Amino acid sequence: MGAVLLIDFGSTWTKLTAVSLASETLLGSASAFTTVEEDITIGLEEAMGVLEKKIGPQKYDNIWACSSAAGGLRMHVSGLVPELTAEAARMAALGAGAKIEQVFSYELTKQDLALIENNKPDIFLLVGGTDGGNRDYIVGNAGKLAGLSVRFPIIYAGNRSALDECSEILRDFPLTVCTNVMPSFGELQTEAVQKEIRNLFLTQIIEAKGLTKTRALLSGILMPTPSAMLSAMTLLAEGTETEAGIGSLLGIDVGGATTDVYSIADGLPQDVQVMLKGLPEPHAKRSVEGDIGMRHCIDGIIAERGLENLAADCSLAPTRVRELTAKFSQAKYIIPSSQEEEAFELALARAAVDVASRRHSGKLQEVYTPTGLAYVQTGKDLCSLEQIVLSGGALIHAKEPLTIASAALFDTAVPTSLRPLRARVWRDSKYILSAMGVLAEKEADIALRIMKRELENIGEIFSEKN
């Protein structure tokens, strides 16, 4: 076994990681700005030049990649009931590495259709009804999509009884058919949909993303970056048949535009008095907070945290926080260079982790029954989870990573949020997680051993409840 080159075409940076499979070591890494607007190979060649200066010329047996360039894999999903088939479709798409831009329920309205027309998705996931159940909504929605002037790939994963009629209605679209995401009430089947989303990414979407030129360089693997991250997190937690993982974990990736959260855990109720409500959560779960980011979406953080509270967090006047917000939002690549800017960055990162981890984790609700007080859980119970993995520039380069990570723990101010009570914290200091997710497609044991060796163990944190 020789060397392989792993590429992550990010929306901002193109990152390279060279690995020796024989010695199971990192040879080196490099990055350059992604140049998808001009020619994505320009940034790639620049990064490869930087890498060669670091480690010398290399002959790579294989070159594999992932990509979130040009906005990532943008999807719309349409289901019937918000809490059921629409939610099942959303889970399936997120697990495949997509960025969910719209979720529609029941009948598509004129406003919904105008939004789709003006913001054409990379893929539209059409679901609705259990097999043999309600077919009127999904047939009606298929007809409305057929009336649009734009065309895009559609995955049909709804009521099998409506398949023939919907296939005829949507004959002018690139149509892929797979099994119903909810064949019977409360039963989830997302694997087939996720496989088809990835197939479409490989066969059609990369051309629209300007990645066609890279195919000649690659050796076969090209996947959405979030899918690579979820693969890495799952491998790190669960291990392989021959190599143990580190156990259930919560992964947090804070970016400039979004904050992605991953949990690899069952998340079932820990108390017999707690009843579980809603669809079963996937063991390997990904959520994306599209309004929470360190540069493009600072306003989303402020909207959640509050300007006055954020100002207090960083011991700055609200007027100064407004000034820094404008500066950081406009200068997307800014690196904090003063004590004020560092304090502001720390406060933003803590707030982003707090909000994103609360939204991802399950919740408890008190209910009164004929036999007395009881509790209902929605989502995952992550209280007993004891590993947190940090990624993303703001967390990788942070001077106080444990302070930021502690914002993901149980908080007595929000006692209904089922977040971890304690955790050992690992940091992806060398930006290898997406690369290891790609490598795991072919060499899972090696990818796992590299992660276990290279991720930085930065200590333990405990919630106030402890």
Image (cartoon, rainbow, N blue to C red):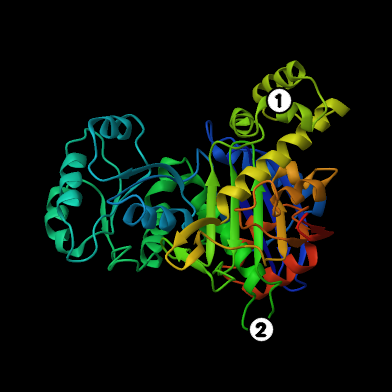
Place residue 346 in its image quadrant: top right
Amino acid type of the residue tagged 2 in the rendering: Thr
- Name the residue: 78% across, 52% down: 429
Crowding near the residue tagged with mark 2, few <14, some 14–19, many ≥20 C-alpha atoms within 10 Å: few
Q: Of 414 and 143, which appears nearest the observer?
A: 414
Describe the element under mark 2 as helix, strand or loop: loop
* Residue shown at 81% from the left, 23% from the top: 316
Depth check, front residue: 279 or 39: 279
The answer to whether any part of residue 217 appears in the image is no
Q: Are marks 2 and 1 in contact (CB under 8 Å)?
A: no
- Which residue matches tag 1? 308
Q: Name the spot of residue 95 as percent of width and height, x first.
A: 48, 58
User: Is 345 on the left or on the right of 113, as rendered?
Assistant: right
Mark 2 vs mark 1, foreground winner is: 1
> In the rendered view, would you say 70 is above or below 127?
above
- Figure quadrant of residue 272: bottom right
Residue at the (73%, 72%) spot, across then down: 449
Label of residue 242 in the image: 2
Q: How far separated are the C-alphas under marks 2 and 1?
A: 52 Å
Looking at the rendered structure, the kind of residue marked 1 is: Glu
